[in-house]
Image (spheres, grey):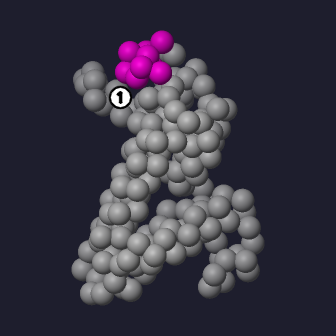
Amino acid sequence: MPRKSGDERRQHVIEAAIETFAAEGYHGASTTMIARRAGISQPYIYALFENKHDLFLAAYHEVAERIRTRLVAAAEGEEGPEDRMRAMGDAYLAMIGNSAEVLCQLQAYAAAGDPALRGPIRDEFIRLFESVRETAGVSREEASFFFAGGIFLAIASALGVPREFWPGGGDPPAD
């Protein structure tokens, strides 16, 4: 079996970090837990990342980029702003539930109480926000309402809020 490149090993650790941070949060997760999930020694994490802070931000950047890519792709080919927003909303709705990406996203927002994390998390959020706004061709106010609905749905899903409290009714996404 061929050895993984440095980039492949780094990506493998980021995947393990996403899963671990999604489940445990920034403060609850340890590099030992992430290393165990990745099947590597804990000191090897520090060969790839300077510290847990940098690993967390790398995981959040990966998550935000995946979400951004899926939302932008969903809007491709849609005619007007309303159709693009609806397509992006449907794409995000399909991602929530027990998605490690969306749970990691929520954990990042919770971790932003840490002043050392707040700026980079804010910058990544603004990048995602502006990408969605520009892709949809809507105002910042319209994009804000889109994000407000998305965060509501992500939180409601993470908490297992019954579907009757969700806009539109029906069944929540499958686990």
The image quarter containing residue 71 is bottom left
Residue 118 visible, this orientation: yes
Q: Residue at x 30, y 87 (%)?
A: 80
The secondary element bearing badge 1 is classed as helix
Query: Is 109 drawn above or below residue 151 in the view shown?
Result: above
Q: Is residue 70 left or right of residue 1?
A: right
Quadrant placement of the N terminus: top left
Q: In the image, residue 46 lies at what x, y percent?
A: 43, 16
Q: In the image, residue 7 lies at what x, y percent?
A: 28, 29
Query: Is 7 drawn above or below residue 146 in the view shown?
Result: above
Q: Residue furthest top?
A: 43
Tell me the amino acid under the disc marked 1.
Arg
The image quarter containing residue 169 is bottom right
Q: Residue at x 60, y 56 (%)?
A: 98
Quadrant placement of the C terminus: bottom right
**Magenta stretch contains residue 22:** no
The image quarter containing residue 168 is bottom right
- Tell me which segment is drawn in magenta: 43-51
Main SS type for the magenta part?
Answer: helix
Q: Residue at x 52, y 50 (%)?
A: 105
Q: Residue at x 52, y 33 (%)?
A: 116
Pointer 1 residue: 10
Q: Is residue 110 left or right of residue 95?
A: right
Residue neighbourhood size for the residue with mark 1, other residues' Cα within 10 Å, grouped as few (<14), some (14–19), many (≥20): some
Q: Nearer the viewer, residue 173 or 31?
A: 31
Q: Is residue 65 left or right of residue 172?
A: left
Q: Nearer the viewer, residue 170 or 114?
A: 114
